[in-house]
Structures are given as structure tokens and as C-alpha cells.
Amino acid sequence: MLFGEPEYRLDQMRHGPVAEQTPPACPEAFTVEQRALWDATVECLTRMGLARKADQQRLADLVWCEWLVQDCIRRINETGPLIRGASAEPKVNPLLAVQRRADARATTLAREFGLTPSARSRLLPKPGDMVPT
């Protein structure tokens, strides 16, 4: 049983607190290349109605990880997947491990923002859920 003033009854609350819908500002420490990636990501989230100022730090992490993946790929393309070790033996380029970890983290963060196909399928209404107008 629920008691209390009607405006405070939990069974009548439809929505929780809503984060401010202002797009987050790009971190000042970002490079020009990172800012371009930030702008593209925020634009995408804004079109989806998901850009929130409260998500600035998480979004900065996502953009930084995506940039790191791109940077590692660029450097691996320059040096190759194998490099010479201290005694001239070939070994796996350590940037491959950095790239894989950054990509895994970026995928996790992208999922939180609805930027993967599986995450979008959970966010979008199913055809049977559509209410006729």
C-alpha cells in the first residue's frame, strides 16, 4: 500500500530526473583531430536525442579511445605488425595490444551511448510497440 501526498506517490511518478539536454562542450586539451572526432560524435548523438552535458566525461573517454585506435592503426601501418626486438629478433608490435585494448574500451563506451547496432536495437521501438496516431 502506498501512502503520502499524491504528488510524492511513487506509483504516480512516470519519469525520473532528466539530464540537461545541452550538448557537452569539447575538452580544451583535445587536439584538432580529436576535436573533429568529438564534433562528429556529438552531432550523431544530438540527432539521436542522446547528447547530454552530464555525459561529458564519458563522451571524452569514448572520443579519446576512438582517436587512440586510429592513431595506433596509422603507426602500425608505418612500422608494420612486426618490429625488431633488442637482439634483432622479430616480435609483435606492442601498438597492436594498445589498439586492441582501446578498441574494446571504445566499443564498451559506444554501447553505453547507443552507438552500436545491438545497442540501437534496444533503444528503438519495435514495430509492434508503435502506437497508431
Image: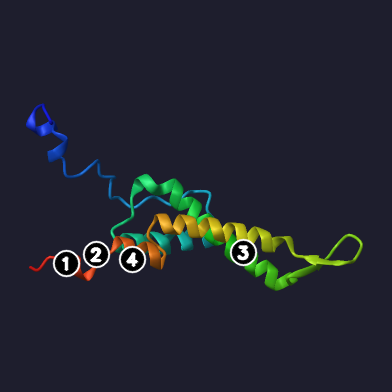
Residue topped by disc 2: 125
Between the residue at mark 4 and the residue at mark 1, the CA separation in whole angstroms equals 14 Å
The answer to which quarter of the image holds residue 39 is bottom left
* Among the two numbered marks 3 and 1 on one chain, the one whose residue lies closer to the N terminus: 3
Q: Regarding mark 3 in the picture, which secondary structure is present there?
A: helix
Which marked residue is nearer to the observer: mark 3 or mark 1? 1
Residue topped by disc 3: 71
Q: Position of residue 119 (x, y in %)?
A: 38, 62
Residue topped by disc 4: 121
Is 92 situated above or below 56?
A: below
Residue type marked 2: Pro
Rate crowding at label 1 as few (under 14), some (14 to 19) or many (20 or more) other CA atoms within 10 Å.
Answer: few
Which marked residue is nearer to the observer: mark 4 or mark 3? 4
Between the residue at mark 3 and the residue at mark 1, the CA separation in whole angstroms equals 42 Å
Q: How is the image coloured?
A: rainbow
> For the view shown, which residue lies furthest in the top direction?
4
User: Which mark identifies residue 50?
Assistant: none
Contact? badges 1 and 2 (CB < 8 Å): yes
* Among the two numbered marks 4 and 3 on one chain, the one whose residue lies closer to the N terminus: 3
Between the residue at mark 4 and the residue at mark 2, the CA separation in whole angstroms equals 8 Å
The answer to which quarter of the image holds residue 89 is bottom right
Q: Answer whether residue 62 is visible to the viewer in this image.
A: yes
At 16% from the left and 44% from the top, the residue drawn is 14
Q: Regarding mark 4 in the picture, which secondary structure is present there?
A: helix
